[in-house]
Structures are given as C-alpha cells and as structure tokens.
Amino acid sequence: MKHWKILLASAAVAALGCPAAQAQEPQTGGTLITAVPITFKTMDPVYGDSDITDRLALNQVFEPLFRLDEKGDMVPILASGYRYNANNTELTVSLRKGITFQDGTPFNADAVVFNFTRLMGATGAMRTGTVSWLKSVEKTGDYEVKLTVKTPTGYALSSLAAEGTLMISPAAFERYGDDFGRHPVGTGPFRFVDWIGADRIILERNPDYWMKDAAGKPLPYLDGVEIRSITNYATAMLELESGGVELLSVVNPQDFQRVRDSADLGLLEGPQVLAHQALVNVTHPPFDKKEVRQAFAWAIDRETLAKAIAGEDGLVYPTYVPPAEWEFDPTIKGYGFDPTKARELLNQAGYPDGVSFEMLTIQREPDISIAQILQQMLKESGFDMELTVLERQAWIGQVITEGRFDASMLAGQHPRIDPHDTWARSYIAEQGGNWSRHQDQTLVDMIYKARDTVDREERKKIYREVAERALDESYILFLFDRRAYGGVNKRVIGVEVDNGGAWVLTRTWIQP
Amino acid sequence: MVFYILRRVVSVIALMLVMSAVIFATTTWLPGDPAVSILGIESSEQQRAEVRELYGLDDPIPLQYVRWLGRALEGDLGRSIRTREDVGQMLASRAPITLQLTFFALLVAVAIGIPAGIFAARMRGRLTDDVISTLALIASAIPFFWLGVLLIMIVAVRLHWLPASGYALFFEHPLESLKLMILPAIAVGGSMAALITRQTRSAMLQVLNEDFVRTGRAKGLREDQVVLRHALPNAMIPVITVVGLQAGALLGGAIVTEKVFAIAGIGSMVIDGIFNRDFPVIQGAMLFIVLCVALINLAVDLLYTVVDPRISYR
C-alpha cells in the first residue's frame, strides 16, 4: 500500500490576494460582497454546467474529500488520507471524524457512499463523467470507504476534487429532492440562507464549522458572504470601484492597469489562465488537410498576439497547458511564426494561391479582438479569413451541435482538475469534446491510456506524446494563455483560491 | 361600462392565446440547443440526446406547444429548462421588481415631463422654451442604457451619492429601495420625460389658443387657474395616450436597464431566457409583458373618461 504525505489544509491551499496585511491579526465579522459574471444554474454540485465558475459559490457551502492546491497537489479536506491496493484497483479513503453537515447530520462513510451513488446514477448531468471510472463504492468502516475502479486510473484520485464529488447532506437531499439545488446543505464554512431570484446568493457563517485557524480560532472569520450575479461587466467593474462589491471574479485585460493603479483595489492572482485557441473543422476543405492546418499554425505570431491582447499577462506555451498543471512540459516544441514555411505547406497541400475560410467567434472580448488581429496576421501567409461574429447560442448551434463551420475561436479556463479533463474535453467526443470532428483514434487511445495510468511520472510521459501529436495534427491551434485575474478591495485579506482560481473564503477577513 | 370592460378582458385573453403561439413558434426558430443550456457545452452528444428525450425537446413543435398550453391553462407555466425553477414562481418574485422600476420611471417621466411641457408652452418663443425644448431633444436622443452607465460612473463611482446597482422592494425596504431606484428610474424615464414634455407643450399650445381660455383670462382669472384648471385637462387626452403607449415601451426599456443595473426583474428573465433558449421562461415572461401592456392600454382608455366626462363606453 502506498501512503501519500498528508498536508495541512491551512498550509497547502494557496493564500493569495492581499499580501500586505497578512501579518495582521484576522478580524472576525463583516459580510463580504462578491460578484460573478454569470447566473448560477443551481447550487447542486452534480447538476451545474460551468466547471470552475460554479465553484465560486459551491466552495463556500460544500467541501470535497480532497482539494487541489496551486501546484496540483491533493490536499485532504474531508478525507484524512487514502491508499491504493497493490494493483491499483481499489482506492480506500479514510474520512475525518467529528464533522457535521450544516443541518446537524453527521458526515461519515454513509454520506460518502450516498454522494457517489447519486453521482453515478444522475441523469441529465454533465458531471456523471467525473466518475466514469468508478465501478462501485462501499463502506468499509464508519469513516472509511472503498472505491473500486473499472480499470486502474490516475484520474480517480483527481476526480475526488471535482465539482461533482463535493459532499452534500443526504438528509437534506431526502427533504428537498429535486429542489435541493435551491436549498443546498454541505459541510463548508458558510451555510445557505437565501437565493434571491437570479440576483444574489446569501450565505452566513456556519457556526459549527469544523476547521480552526493556526491559533485555534474558529473559522470562518466572516459573518457572511453575498454572491451577486452581475452579468454586465461594465456594471460589475463600476461596483468594484464604488465599493459596492469587494471581490469580483473576473477583470478583463483592458482594466488590469486601471486596477493596479487604484489606491483601493488590487488584482487577485492565482494559478488560473484563460487559454485562447482556434478550432478547425477537419471534415471538409480547407482544413481536412494536415498541411493546411500546420500552415495555419506557422502563420500565427503568438508573442505579438499575446502582447497585443494581454500585455505582460500574455503567456505563450507550447500548448494550452499552463505550468500550474502538473503535466506541463516546457521542453515540448510548439509552433513559431514562419510565414514562408506556412506558404510552402499551403503549396504542398495544393493551395499555391492561398486559402479562404470563415472564422466564427462568439460575441465577446477579447475573442473578437484576437480574431481581428489574426485576420491581418494570416494574410502574410496566404490565408484570407472572413470573420463572423455570432451570439453565443447561435455559435453553439453552428459549431457544437451542427458542425457547420470552417474555423472558430475558443477559450477555456485552466488548469483543470486533471490533465484528462484538459485533453479529453478538447479531443474526445464522448467526453464532451472533439468539435473539430477528427477521426484520430490514435490520439483518443493515447488520452485514455494516460488517464488509465496511475503513476504520475508515467502519465506525464504519455501526455507529452499526446501534446506532440495534438501539435502535429493541429485540430486545435494553440494561440496563447493569459493570466486571469479577479479584482479585490484591498481591505479584504486572505482570499484563497483553488487550482482553478475559484475562491475559498474560509480564512478571508475584512480589515476594519 | 361594465360590458365594455368585460369585452376588453375577453379580447386580452384572446390576444394572449395568439401571442403564446407566436412567441412559441418564433423562439423555436432561434438557433441553438436547449440541451446544451441544461448540460453545459462540455457535454457529450449522448448526454444531450438523453436530455432531449427526458424533456421532450425532440417532440414535434406543435405537440410541445399543445403540451405547454394544456398545463398553462391549468395555471402551470412549466419549469425553467436550465434551472428547473417553477416559471410561475419566477414571475411572482420578479414581477414586483420590474413593475416597481416601471412605476418609478413613469413617475420620473410624468413628474418632469408634464410640468416642463406646461412651462415651455407658457414661455413659448422665449429662452426658457428654447432651453426646455433643447434639453428634451437631447434626452430623447441619448440611449437609455448609455445614460445608465454614465449615471453609475458619475453618481455612484465618482460622487458616492448612490449605490451603483441592485434593488430592494419598496414595501420591504422603502428607503433602500428609493436609493437603488433613482438612477435606473432616471435612465429609463429620462427619454420618456422628453417625449411627454414635447407632447404636453404641443397640446397646451393648441389649447391655450382656444376661445374658452381667452374668455377665462378676460374674466380676470389668474393665469395659473387658466392654465391648470381649464387648459391642462383639455390638453391631457393626447398626453395620456402618449403615456399609455410609452408605458409599454418602458417595459421594453426595463429589459436592458435591468441588465445594466443588475436588477433581477422580468427583463433580465427574458434576456437570460433568450440567451439560454429557455422556452418556458421566455413564454412566461413575454406573456406577462403582453398582459401588462394590454392592461395599461385598458387603464388609459378608462382614464379618458375621468379626464373628459364627455367620453363614455358602452
């Protein structure tokens, strides 16, 4: 059996945000007003539709067995440890004792079994894929469960930190049934009070929260949290500047400097990035030919693009995988900028006079700006790009549902819970990806092989091969990543984020 | 009068039936996939197919409409495809918010527009008239959503006089509600005030030239008595008409304004429903708006009889 080192949660989860006052004594009290740019679908962890973003709210009410820190290491939260059996077919998780749900019912092995069973059998839920590896779950003690896998997989452990495996109260689910999403009950530092229309979610301190700070003081420090849905970005920024909101989940690149220059505000940093890509449809010309796709890849000056859009916060990596994901390998050779090579490849592909195609983009920034820059950039290499901006649902219909496009802009948040989510969501149809509609079974098999390998170093080697094949085939062109910042009032201290950049407000406090 | 009202109620019901079919048909023509709204974009085609079957999204459109209509006639407007909230409850919680915003915007528009129009008519040809008319022109040209952002920037961010966004119900938190409603009410009501100003000025100018006004002045009545007691009631019919017509437009304006000021009313509900292709939500919200506009028109017609006793309905 293997034992992994158990890290203290208080030391392992990233503590970022307002470093200047961290030496001060935390003050108890106050309600933190936060804002997010979406309207949450539900507070049921199984039925959400937006990974990472959902955790902005879910992390405050629910807790997972493990949470990923900024380095991608697993930090035990509701679990106290885990071990595999000799052939990695059984994962036994031991649970912390003395924890109760916010409704007073105990957190124990029965609750964990309930949660996994529910997730496995959920219908109409994207997150059932989180436990696609799970064969069965059983209780082996009051505070121990055994998860039996279908086939040994390194993904199993990572998935214990995913949204779908956040622990809900079985008693509350029995009471509320399908309405549980509007009456969430977990073990987290805040308990649910009210959800006012699509306007705000109101949480208050969980007086029986199990975690204490390093000095033994009860957590959380805050009396409560309000999570407002402000979908208009301009309004959200104005609220942050006026003090009506103290923590904002997203600041767009054009406002980074304005926030940095502000006396009252700061940028909330974390490991998260937004990865910008261009997707091509390989079912018809011109991108059915690999040479054309590679030509497209060589035709992009990524450094200039990253700088133009995000300044010093634009980052160019070989693929969209950022350093915060453990499989990141800086030695992988990505594409440079070489219009001559691009033209040669087009010539080889039978397009000596260049290629015309249509690029779709959702009506949002900076996707439109990126596409406009690309449009000019690609001319040098013989690409004549027509840009079409679509409303989001129209884009979904045309790109995802119907596959009626040549190329499209894409953006995605990273890091993900596991590299499998990163690659499968891009390249495997059964896992919600492959919008390029390739038939590359070799690539698919490689991604599954990496998932089904337990040793992390071995997985890393396979993911290197996956990255190299993905670059070679270029079904998706990796453009650049950019740091994704939130905005925070400088009076707010101790905002922690998980590996995806979602807040964990357990140790957050407000300076008087 | 009673029969008139009953006839109008019947016509409103018929209107809503027709509109429900029109709205249903037009929303189904919109591109997009409700199954993706339910699951998220990173769902597999198999998951989306299961959801379409679960919620009957693959059924023929007429069948979906008849199913929805059957439940609606029993008072069940269905559940949001995305959030599974009861649409009726959504309307019940959001309608007071939008109606409150519309009321305050109307109040702003009438409180500014009518006095300004009267004053401009009295000061016809003078600098005051020119200033009022120019301001009205500017106010009617400014897009209200732009005005909304401008108001937030100046009043909330720079001056810290009022909150930037949000809402509170007046009957629950009156002072807080007033503070939160001032900026959106001005943003929405501003351009309507301009229209009312111009209509009032125009109607007053016509009435002030009538013989009975000259007679009143000749008999020695004070000018304010002539204008307010005699001229204004006669000028109000076209003004009421404009107010009634614009009340419907105000509801439409509330849709965008609610997004700017982060107000979770019917307007936001419509926008979110459209963006998510959430048909039950779109249906419920649009039918509510249709009902409101129809009732406002009925109220305007009835108000004519109060302002001008010569008007009666059978």
Image (spheres, coloured by chain):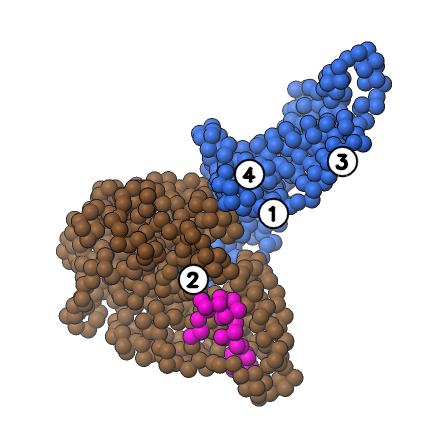
Q: Chain of mark 2?
A: A
For badge 3, the amino acid type reads Asp
For badge 4, the amino acid type reads Leu
For badge 1, the amino acid type reads Trp
- Residue designated by label 4: B183
> Viewed as shown, does residue A197 lie left or right of A451?
right
Q: Secondary structure at mark 3?
A: helix
Q: Earlier in the sequence, mark 4 or mark 3?
A: 3
Q: Same chain for the residues at labels 1 and 3, yes or no?
A: yes
Q: Quadrant of the N terminus of chain B?
A: top right
Q: Chain of mark 3?
A: B
- Residue designated by label 2: A484
Gap between marks 3 and 2 measured at Cα = 52 Å
The quarter of the picture where residue A399 lies is bottom right
Image mark for residue B130:
3
Gap between marks 4 and 3 measured at Cα = 26 Å
Q: Residue at image x 31%, y 64%?
A: A70
Please say if A182 is above or below A457: above
Taking the image as drawn, is residue B40 in sight?
no
Mark 3 vs mark 2, foreground winner is 3
Chain ID for blue: B
Residue B121: percent from left, percent from top? 77, 28
- Residue designated by label 1: B146
Q: Secondary structure at mark 4?
A: helix
Q: Same chain for the residues at labels 4 and 2, yes or no?
A: no
Chain A tint as drawn:
brown
